[in-house]
Image (cartoon, grey):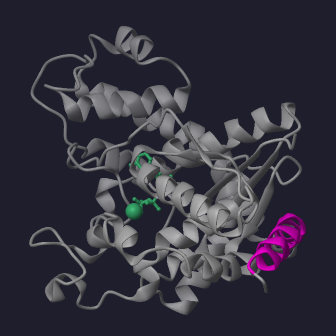
Amino acid sequence: KATPITFSGIQPTGHPHLGNYLGAISNWVTLQEEAYQAKETVLFSIVDLHAITLPQDPEKLRKERREMAITLLACGVDPKKCILFEQSKVSGHAELTWLLNCMTPVGWLARMTQWKAKMGVTKGSQSLEDVEATKGLQLGLFAYPVLMAADVLLYKATKIPVGEDQIQHLELARDVAQTFNKMVKTPFFPLPQPKITETKRIMSLRDPTNKMSKSDASDQTRINLVDSPDLISSKIKRAVTDGIRGISYDQTNRPAVANLIRIYAAMKRVSVEDVVREHADSSTAAFKEALADVLITSLKPIQDEMARLEKEDAYVQSVLDDGAAKAAEIAIPNLQEAQRLLGL
Ligand code: ADP
Ligand code: NA
């Protein structure tokens, strides 16, 4: 029996922020360590083909791809323990997508929520026949979930770390895999399984009902991993809180403070209870100062390593080249067999 393969991807768009770090990148490092102990293969992909499903400025995308690679390495993604590569450099992703496109019903994609969300479709029938809803919808954005299916099936990956919002896409990947298997009368693709990661959802510093996101127009809503100590201090100082005295964890009545407590706990690797115990009698101003200190201290080694890697262009490129070669080694035989099964 083949050992399980893990696949996960991250888009190289915008500056990586604290939400990306606590919600995704730090989980990758944990997964990598677990897999390394178990002698399993883990593939981490900078999914640049997904990034271009929305218009990108080429020069900016080039910079962001490099920044993401450097960020991942600085955060502890270790090319000795995982395969780190750029999606566009393993042509099998695009090639398998085409094979899968040819057997994916358009109706399945029409039901997906992501193209609607990215198009800002919030009303109306939200169906493909709705001309308003689909105005400006490119085929690539619409077919994005098929590319995601190809990402995991290309490696016959079965362990797929996903957040709640990605479950719909993983189900589509399973349906596509089953359609392929039925068509070729062979259980060729194993069905990918969601590995629901306990995700720490980090909210905007200015509005605790919104998640911290790089697509938020205001930079004050997020801590970017590259933010200077002064900038971190001022953003935290101006984060919204409430008029309630002391520090207590109450997601319903004190969502903004709860978010700050979660950030503190996650960065210091202590429990929420410990944070509350330590700061119960602090003013919010004092707690914010302590939080800024924790952020500045814990981001420092990451920032130092990023600064070092900025100057190691050849090294970073060699990591990505090696990663692409190793990924292709797994992908090529799978792609060739998929083609053969289809009569190609
Ligand atoms: P953004 O919303 O900033 O554009 P992405 O959608 O590119 O971020 O997400 C990249 C990864 O980071 C995903 O795994 C996503 O679940 C995670 N992530 C993004 N924002 C947050 C957040 N605020 N809290 C926790 N995880 C997040
Ligand atoms: Na997003």
Left or right: where 260 falls relative to 51: left
Q: Residue at x 31, y 34 (%)?
A: 259
**Would you say residue 139 is visible in this rendering?**
yes
Residue 341: say if magenta: yes
Residue 47: say if magenta: no
- Quadrant for residue 279, please give it: top left
Q: Residue 118's x, y, as percent?
A: 31, 72
Which residue is at the front of the view, 49 or 284? 49
Q: Residue at x 64, y 69 (%)?
A: 183
- Secondary structure mostly seen in magenta is helix
Residue 97 vertical position relative to residue 303 in the rendered view, above or below: below
Left or right: where 91 falls relative to 212: right
Q: Residue at x 62, y 83 (%)?
A: 98
Q: Residue 233's x, y, as percent?
A: 38, 45
Location of the C terminus by quadrant is bottom right
Which residue is at the front of the view, 45 or 302? 45
**Would you say residue 14 is visible in this rendering?**
no
Q: Quadrant of ligand 1?
A: bottom left
Residue 232 vertical position relative to residue 322 in the rendered view, above or below: above
Left or right: where 205 falls relative to 81: left
Q: In the image, which residues are magenta? A: 322-342
Q: Residue 166's x, y, as percent?
A: 45, 53
Residue lying furthest front: 185
Which residue is at the front of the view, 273 or 89? 89
Q: Residue at x 22, y 42 (%)?
A: 208
Residue 270 vertical position relative to residue 86 in the rendered view, above or below: above
Location of the N terminus by quadrant is top right
Q: Residue 2's x, y, as percent?
A: 86, 44
- Quadrant for residue 68, please give it: bottom right
Left or right: where 317 falls relative to 23: right
